[in-house]
Amino acid sequence: MYAILDIETTGGKYNEEGITEIAIYKFDGHKVIDTFISLVNPEREIQPFVVNLTGINSNMLKSAPKFYEVAKRIVEITEDCIIVAHNSQFDYRILRTEFKRLGFPFIRKTLCTVELSKQLIPDQASYSLGKLTRALGIPVSDRHRANGDAMATVKLFKILLAKDLDKTIIKDNVKLDITKRLNDTHKTIIDGLPSITGVYYVHDEHGEIIYIGKSKNIKHRINQHLTNTSSKSRKLQLLAKTVTYEATGNELVALLKENEEIKRNKPKLNRALKRTVFTHGLYSYTDNDGYLHLNIARINGEDIPITTFSNLQSATSFIHRVVEDYQLCQKLTGISTSKTSCFDYSIKKCAGACILEESAKDYNLRVNKLISRNSYANQNMIVIDQGREIGEKSVIYIENGIFRGLGFYELNHQINTKDVLESIITPMENNRDTQHIIQSYLRRNKRTKTMII
């Protein structure tokens, strides 16, 4: 659990500042579950430059509560939370100073989004909250006010969580959580999970990730793990102390994140991912008469297939379907071995490419349309799908036919340049596994939106 906050102060000498405004968002890693926002009477003078920066003046604070009046609420909303702030060293110092004046030892773990951003979003021109949010296209209102800056930090932190493929942030959070809940039953674990699409992480008593999986229904899948009698399930049942998850909004993002994070984290109960999770590919060649032929063959590691399949059955089903959809010749797609015309020609479903009646130019036009639809080689494109919540979309970024990564953006996100798009993307490895995942998903989900950029 996280307490994401921002504090405005009077300015002045070190450790003599007072709080003028505070905003705290309690965040469970997915959504805000509690909020506290208040002006605070600092009982001291506000520096003129601070008034100009924030717009908060002494007249506004005359009837505001003093710090001791809001201290109990601050303790409650931050209890058992990691404090997250942009330059957390400053905000945490100010809070501890105020509590020290009351004689109360305020101690919390902290995370700094400046430091996290430097690690996870390198090479930014500036890591100030204003410039960083602009670079990421995050809309910000009420800049230099506690509520506006705290909400901007929430949005930034969500991006950082998605970019943290090594799961360092959640592992630290889980360690804090497990110390309180070592005796949790499996039922308690299941009850705390949602029935959503995403990636889940099973942790042991030390907070280490021992298994990563994906599911369209995380709650149902974990219930299967913790009630099944298979060898893997029994190991999970013995070692599992808690389960965290990351919502993805759709299956494609879940598949890509699972693939990447298993390889990065190497959980001990995941079987090693096979380098190739597909067996057959679609290939093409041009014959002496200039006609494009398509054929299904086993992947040999030398020739690059147009698209790939998990097994021969799915490949065969695909080729039969596209022959019908694109009015292709059975003979030129390997379905018919006839030495003359194919069967479809006799029932007028083939225009006669098999006996040179249809021109190679006309026939190849349809074949190339099929190839283009099922391959993103040399293309710059994005795949847009539903996001984790209403008003959000996911985006898969492909540049020159290479998968670059994925991210999320709100509908009011200002993605107006390639630089902004690249800044919200979590970089991921491009390999044959990711190519297969993307191509097979697009084959099965024809309504998924793709855009050439």
Image: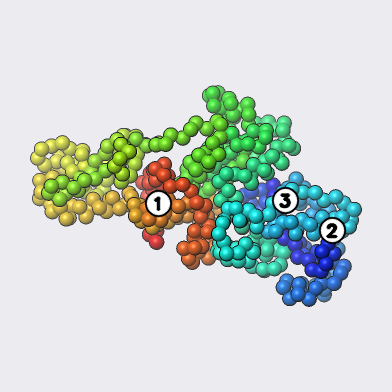
Q: Is residue 435 above or below residue 225?
A: below
Q: Is residue 62 above or below residue 213?
A: below
The residue under the point 32% across, 38% down is 301
Q: Which residue is mark 3?
A: 110
Q: How many numbered discs?
A: 3
> Identity of the amino acid at label 2?
Glu
Numbered label attached to residue 402: 1
Badge 2: few (under 14), some or many (20 or more) residues near its Cα, within 10 Å?
Answer: many
> Identity of the amino acid at label 1?
Ile
Picture coordinates of residue 412, whole percent (x, y): 54, 64
Decide which of tag 1 and tag 2 comes sooner along the chain.
Answer: 2
* Front-lying residue, 29 or 446: 29
Q: Secondary structure at mark 1?
A: strand
- How was the colour assigned to the protein in this rendering? rainbow
The residue under the point 15% across, 36% down is 337
> Identity of the amino acid at label 3?
Thr
Badge 3: few (under 14), some or many (20 or more) residues near its Cα, within 10 Å?
Answer: some
- The alpha-carbon separation of the residues under discs 1 and 3 comes to 38 Å
Q: Which residue is mark 2?
A: 98
The residue under the point 70% across, 59% down is 87
Q: Is residue 242 above or below residue 136?
A: above
Q: Is residue 167 above or below residue 17?
A: above
Q: Are marks 1 and 3 in contact (CB under 8 Å)?
A: no
Q: Secondary structure at mark 2?
A: helix
* Front-lying residue, 328 or 145: 145
Q: Is 298 left, or right, of 269 in this rendering?
A: left
